[in-house]
Amino acid sequence: MFFIFCVSIILVGGWKGVRSLVSLSLSFLVIVEFIIPKILLGANPFIISLLGALFILVVSVYLTEGFSSRANLAILSIIIGLVITL
């Protein structure tokens, strides 16, 4: 199933699909290697979740969309929404 998912993403999305798969992998890595262990060690879940989400956000948007004013505006908008939500 995973292989079929990856192949279909690459076929539909092309190079952008590959970058989105890399972004998905990095997001998973940040959650498993940073957010969950820090929370289990007793760190403030609010701060750790915010830092992890901000890192995932910046990496994902710039990796998939590139560096542009549109990407910068998207990041700013998502940061505002994330802060309001948290």
Image (cartoon, helix red, strand yellow):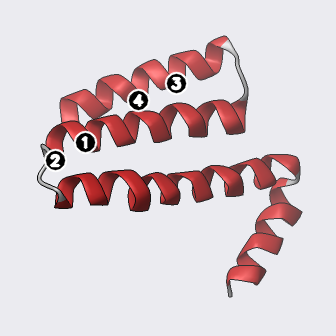
Where is mark 3, residue-wise? 74
Q: In this view, does 12 lie above or below 79?
A: below
Q: Which of marks 4 and 1 is nearer the N terminus?
A: 1
What quarter of the picture does the N terminus occupy?
A: bottom right
Label whose residue precedes the other's in the sequence (1 or 3) = 1
Mark 4 crowd level (few <14, some 14–19, many ≥20, 10 Å Cα): some
Residue 50 percent across, percent down from the top left: 28, 37
**CA distance separating discs 1 and 2:** 5 Å
What x and y, as percent, mark residue 25? Answer: 60, 59
Circle 2 sits on which residue? Answer: 45
Disc with the residue nearer the chain's start (3 vs 2): 2
**Dot 4 or dot 2, earlier in sequence:** 2
Up/down of 29 relative to 70, above or below: below
Measure the C-alpha gap from mark 4 to mark 2: 20 Å
Give the Cα distance between marks 4 and 1: 17 Å
Q: What residue type is labelled 1?
A: Ile
**Position of residue 8 measured from the top left corner of the image (x, y, whole percent):** 80, 72
* Badge nearest the viewer, 3 or 2: 2
What's under tag 2, amino acid-wise?
A: Pro
In the displayed structure image, the side of residue 75 where residue 51 appears, left or right: left
Say if mark 1 contacts mark 3, CB within 8 Å.
no
Q: Is mark 2 on a helix, strand or loop?
A: helix
